[in-house]
Image (tube, helix red, strand yellow):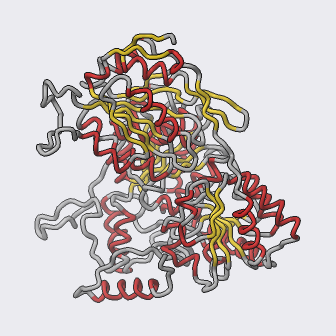
Amino acid sequence: MSKTRMTVGQAIVKFLNQQYIEFDGKVEPFVDGIFTIFGHGMVVGLGQALDEAPGRLRVYQGRNEQGMAHAAISYAKQHNRRRIIACSSSIGVGAANMVTAALTATINNIPLLLFPSDSFATRQPDPVLQQLEVPNDLSMTASDCFKPVAKYWDRVTRPEQLMSALINAMRVLTDTANCGTAVISLPQDVQGESFDYPDYFFQKRVHHVSRRGADDYELKQAVELIKSSKKPMLISGGGVRYSEGGDAVMEFCKEFNIPVSQTQAGHSALPDSFDLSVGGIGVTGGLAANALCKDCDLVIGVGTRFNDFVTGSKWVLFRNPDIKVLAINTSEFHAEKLDATRCIGDAKVTMEALTRELKAAGYRSAYTTEIQEIRDIWEKERLSVLGVQYHGEGFGEGKFVPCVPSWTEKIMTDYIRDIGGTITESNAVGILREEIDDDAIVVAAAGSLPADLERLWVTDAKDSYNMEYGASCMGYEIAGALGSKLAAPDKEVYSLVGDGSFMMLNSEIPTAIQEGAKITIVVFDNAAFGCINNLQMGNGVGTLATEMRHRDPETGKLDGTYCYTDFAKVGEGYGMKGFTAKTPEEFREAVRAAKKETCSCIIDAKVLPKTMAEGYESWWHIGVASTSKSDAVKEARKRIDEHLAQARMY
């Protein structure tokens, strides 16, 4: 058996260069590069190997470890989990900065490969710079923080351990049922140690992504369950997107006249113009899907985790007392939720099999005109909300977040006085949809924008909607736009981000400029953590530390004038082309101008607070105080208890 002597760092680079993935007969490289912020612990270890012989791996310079890992997540998502960029960091704080991203990837079942550096395996120079010392367990380091947020974790304390560690990491990263973050912690001394690695370890490895079909028993159960239903509702989740099963879902729904809704992860897997598509569902869903749920007797969840926003905290989908659930998923864990009848299999092949079986049985749902009628009603409402503008005397028709009217009026009055913006958030979304390319990619993650987009955004362009809403991680939006642009360089990419999220993490803007990767950042500046402010006010709590206001010297509270931030200038400082818009007309012109630019752009859109779209026949279970002196809080708690009395307790 031939062997080659090399360091651990060199072996990692050589191994990653030889990893390929096969899907539906197409073989392509799996690892395209590595994001890094060089620091002590890896700059002369793994860093030396990348400098000496990177192969085809492109090295990207991150600015914040969390941000670069978010970019890697988005890159993998844009490639439907079949191409990745790995990430490496220094020890201690550099490693810990990636924990949030590791959590985000694992929640969303997106492959993320992390190489955090670690303390010395020998412990000889302990404690080294940035080393976490745990007096009762000297084997524990900052890298142990990854254990609860990773699907696979390992620490390589001897060079020969690297082989099993890397192979297991690839197993997880290519597993459709158990995908998430894989962490290989690298002590800084071990990275530079050498070993005689067998040459077969570096042979080309092709990881086959299998399309597992459901077994006959589960398929038969699924067929019988659907046959017994009169008004089923299909939910198309992220699993449909990653299996590229949108066409199979549409064929199924068309054949049997079944409405299909989409989760945030599943959006853009099939076209919104499909005549049985009823849009988003649940807490951030629209009127069409949520209204049809009232009489639905069977929920067919395809590739969805059934989180609380999808199920409306187990209320929206379950108002029919006889409702049943069918879960089609590659993950047994997700398919067992809600006491569902499970059908374990790839979304595409399983839907094709169900179509054949039900077609042979002559099945047809009992829907007549309800689907098209509610689609027509919802489209009228959707366009109404998109077009609502502020003219100084209210909004006329259109639904917006319900809050105490006097508070809302004061917030808007103060905002216009201090900030000067009169754009409504929903109208800004409408203008964007009208002006940008049909196949442009939009990226968002947190605040009120995910709800506005799931309700109001329509697209027929496949995989053009990149919403991180498993973790709803503030800070994903800008780094995610970079990741999508690196994955799809021929597409225009827009980051839709609130002012709070922008302030939290905008570190990867310089990387986008450095790489010549044009992204357009649209900052929806309502001078608040607006979504959470709505949650406060809608449940009887005062507006406490959620608006961006100066501290009033007289009251001692954060209820003074609004803090004005010039986000266009911030972007310009990084090297972007900046635009500021305070009216719908200015915003439209800014979008048009940014589209013509070849460099990255930022649009500072001053949007009125409280102008995001309201929920439609949905409910979100939150922990409202059960004891309070406030009548408003008591009323909010009463509403919670009333919904709980109707919700399923799975």
Residue 243, position in %: x, y? Answer: 66, 47
Visible residue check, residue 593: no
Relative to residue 19, is residue 340 depicted above or below?
below
Instruction: Answer left or right for 338 relative to 104.
Output: right
Relative to residue 252, is residue 83 depicted above or below?
above
Q: Residue at x 29, y 77 (%)?
A: 541
Residue nearer the viewer, 403 or 165: 165
Instruction: Answer left or right for 100 relative to 212.
Output: left
What number of labels is visible? 0
Residue nearer the viewer, 38 or 609: 38
Residue 52, position in %: x, y? Answer: 40, 11
Visible residue check, residue 403: yes
Instruction: Identify the image quadrant of residue 189.
Output: top left
Relative to residue 162, is residue 613 depicted above or below?
below
Residue 372, position in %: x, y? Answer: 76, 72
Residue nearer the viewer, 209 or 242: 209
Q: Residue at x 52, y 34 (%)?
A: 84
Relative to residue 514, is residue 535 depicted above or below?
below
Q: Residue at x 62, y 72 (%)?
A: 325
Q: Residue furthest front?
A: 1
Instruction: Identify the image quadrant of residue 182.
Output: top left
Instruction: Answer left or right for 255 relative to 547.
Output: right
Q: Residue at x 75, y 69 (%)?
A: 258
Residue 336, position in %: x, y? Answer: 55, 65
